[in-house]
Amino acid sequence: MKRFSKFFLLVAALGVVALAIDYWNVTRKERLLSNAVSQIGGRIGSIPSWPLGTEYRITLAAFPTPGQWEQLKIANKMRGWVGIAFEDCELTAYERHRLRRDLERCHLFVVQDGKMGPMDGAGTNRANQ
Protein backbone atom coordinates (compact mmCIF):
# COMPACT_ATOMS: atom_id res chain seq x y z
CA MET A 1 0.00 0.00 0.00
CA LYS A 2 2.86 2.36 0.81
CA ARG A 3 4.43 1.70 -2.59
CA PHE A 4 1.14 2.55 -4.31
CA SER A 5 0.91 5.86 -2.42
CA LYS A 6 4.43 6.84 -3.47
CA PHE A 7 3.68 5.91 -7.08
CA PHE A 8 0.45 7.93 -7.02
CA LEU A 9 2.26 10.96 -5.58
CA LEU A 10 4.95 10.68 -8.25
CA VAL A 11 2.36 10.49 -11.04
CA ALA A 12 0.44 13.44 -9.56
CA ALA A 13 3.64 15.51 -9.28
CA LEU A 14 4.58 14.71 -12.89
CA GLY A 15 1.06 15.70 -13.96
CA VAL A 16 1.33 19.05 -12.20
CA VAL A 17 4.71 19.71 -13.81
CA ALA A 18 3.36 18.76 -17.25
CA LEU A 19 0.37 21.12 -16.82
CA ALA A 20 2.66 23.95 -15.71
CA ILE A 21 4.90 23.48 -18.75
CA ASP A 22 1.86 23.34 -21.05
CA TYR A 23 0.42 26.53 -19.54
CA TRP A 24 3.74 28.32 -19.96
CA ASN A 25 3.97 27.18 -23.61
CA VAL A 26 0.40 28.28 -24.40
CA THR A 27 0.87 31.73 -22.84
CA ARG A 28 4.20 32.15 -24.66
CA LYS A 29 2.56 31.43 -28.03
CA GLU A 30 -0.35 33.75 -27.18
CA ARG A 31 2.11 36.54 -26.43
CA LEU A 32 3.92 35.96 -29.74
CA LEU A 33 0.64 35.97 -31.67
CA SER A 34 -0.58 39.12 -29.92
CA ASN A 35 2.69 40.92 -30.67
CA ALA A 36 2.57 39.84 -34.33
CA VAL A 37 -1.01 41.07 -34.74
CA SER A 38 -0.32 44.41 -33.05
CA GLN A 39 2.77 44.99 -35.24
CA ILE A 40 0.58 44.55 -38.32
CA GLY A 41 -1.91 47.02 -36.85
CA GLY A 42 -4.63 44.45 -36.30
CA ARG A 43 -6.89 43.50 -33.42
CA ILE A 44 -7.05 40.22 -31.52
CA GLY A 45 -9.59 38.86 -29.09
CA SER A 46 -9.89 35.47 -27.47
CA ILE A 47 -12.18 33.28 -25.43
CA PRO A 48 -9.83 31.26 -23.22
CA SER A 49 -10.51 27.71 -22.13
CA TRP A 50 -7.09 26.33 -21.21
CA PRO A 51 -6.11 23.46 -21.34
CA LEU A 52 -8.70 22.50 -23.98
CA GLY A 53 -8.04 25.30 -26.42
CA THR A 54 -8.97 28.89 -27.07
CA GLU A 55 -10.94 30.71 -29.73
CA TYR A 56 -8.87 33.49 -31.29
CA ARG A 57 -10.43 36.15 -33.49
CA ILE A 58 -8.00 38.30 -35.42
CA THR A 59 -8.82 41.24 -37.69
CA LEU A 60 -6.19 42.69 -39.99
CA ALA A 61 -6.52 45.76 -42.19
CA ALA A 62 -3.38 45.10 -44.22
CA PHE A 63 -1.47 42.17 -45.64
CA PRO A 64 1.65 41.55 -43.50
CA THR A 65 5.13 42.46 -44.68
CA PRO A 66 7.58 39.53 -45.07
CA GLY A 67 8.93 39.99 -41.53
CA GLN A 68 5.46 40.25 -40.05
CA TRP A 69 4.37 37.25 -42.12
CA GLU A 70 6.93 35.01 -40.44
CA GLN A 71 5.71 36.13 -37.02
CA LEU A 72 2.04 35.62 -37.95
CA LYS A 73 2.69 31.96 -38.81
CA ILE A 74 2.54 31.24 -35.06
CA ALA A 75 -1.25 31.26 -35.57
CA ASN A 76 -0.90 27.76 -37.09
CA LYS A 77 0.54 26.46 -33.83
CA MET A 78 -2.21 27.71 -31.53
CA ARG A 79 -4.38 25.18 -29.75
CA GLY A 80 -8.00 25.87 -30.57
CA TRP A 81 -9.89 27.78 -33.24
CA VAL A 82 -8.11 30.65 -35.01
CA GLY A 83 -10.07 32.95 -37.30
CA ILE A 84 -8.31 35.69 -39.28
CA ALA A 85 -10.38 38.30 -41.09
CA PHE A 86 -8.95 40.76 -43.61
CA GLU A 87 -10.95 43.95 -43.42
CA ASP A 88 -10.87 46.61 -46.14
CA CYS A 89 -8.01 44.78 -47.89
CA GLU A 90 -7.76 44.02 -51.56
CA LEU A 91 -5.95 40.69 -51.58
CA THR A 92 -4.36 39.47 -54.78
CA ALA A 93 -4.77 35.89 -55.93
CA TYR A 94 -1.16 35.21 -54.89
CA GLU A 95 -1.75 36.64 -51.40
CA ARG A 96 -4.87 34.47 -50.98
CA HIS A 97 -2.91 31.42 -52.14
CA ARG A 98 -0.11 32.22 -49.71
CA LEU A 99 -2.58 32.67 -46.85
CA ARG A 100 -4.22 29.32 -47.56
CA ARG A 101 -0.86 27.60 -47.91
CA ASP A 102 0.91 29.03 -44.87
CA LEU A 103 -2.06 29.37 -42.49
CA GLU A 104 -3.75 26.10 -43.40
CA ARG A 105 -4.95 25.46 -39.84
CA CYS A 106 -6.63 28.86 -39.55
CA HIS A 107 -10.06 29.92 -40.73
CA LEU A 108 -9.66 32.80 -43.17
CA PHE A 109 -12.27 35.47 -43.84
CA VAL A 110 -12.63 38.64 -45.86
CA VAL A 111 -14.77 41.61 -44.89
CA GLN A 112 -16.31 43.40 -47.86
CA ASP A 113 -18.94 46.10 -47.56
CA GLY A 114 -19.21 45.40 -43.83
CA LYS A 115 -20.07 41.73 -44.39
CA MET A 116 -17.74 38.93 -43.39
CA GLY A 117 -17.51 35.79 -45.46
CA PRO A 118 -15.09 32.90 -45.78
CA MET A 119 -12.13 33.29 -48.07
CA ASP A 120 -12.47 30.94 -51.04
CA GLY A 121 -11.61 27.40 -49.91
CA ALA A 122 -10.12 28.54 -46.61
CA GLY A 123 -10.27 26.73 -43.31
CA THR A 124 -10.63 23.22 -44.64
CA ASN A 125 -8.21 21.71 -42.12
CA ARG A 126 -10.04 22.48 -38.88
CA ALA A 127 -8.08 20.33 -36.42
CA ASN A 128 -5.97 22.79 -34.44
CA GLN A 129 -4.20 20.76 -31.76
Image: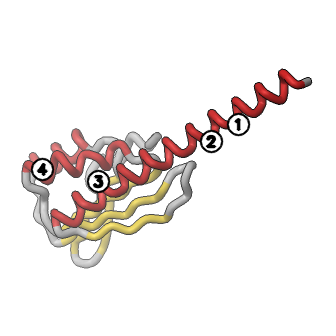
Q: Amino acid at mark 1?
A: Ala
Q: Amino acid at mark 2?
A: Val
| Residues at marks 2 and 1, CA–CA distance in whole angstroms | 6 Å
Residue ID for mark 1: 12
Quadrant in the rendering for residue 128: top left
Residue ID for mark 2: 16
Q: Amino acid at mark 3?
A: Leu
Mark on residue 32? Answer: 3
Disc 4 element:
helix
| Quadrant of the drawing holding the N terminus | top right
Up the image or down, 45 lies above or below 126; here it is below
Work out whether mark 3 precedes mark 2 in sequence or the reverse, and give the earlier one: 2
Closest to the observer, 118 or 17: 17
Work out whether mark 3 precedes mark 1 in sequence or the reverse, and give the earlier one: 1
Work out whether mark 4 precedes mark 2 in sequence or the reverse, and give the earlier one: 2
Disc 1 element:
helix
Q: Position of residue 96 (x, y in %)?
A: 17, 50
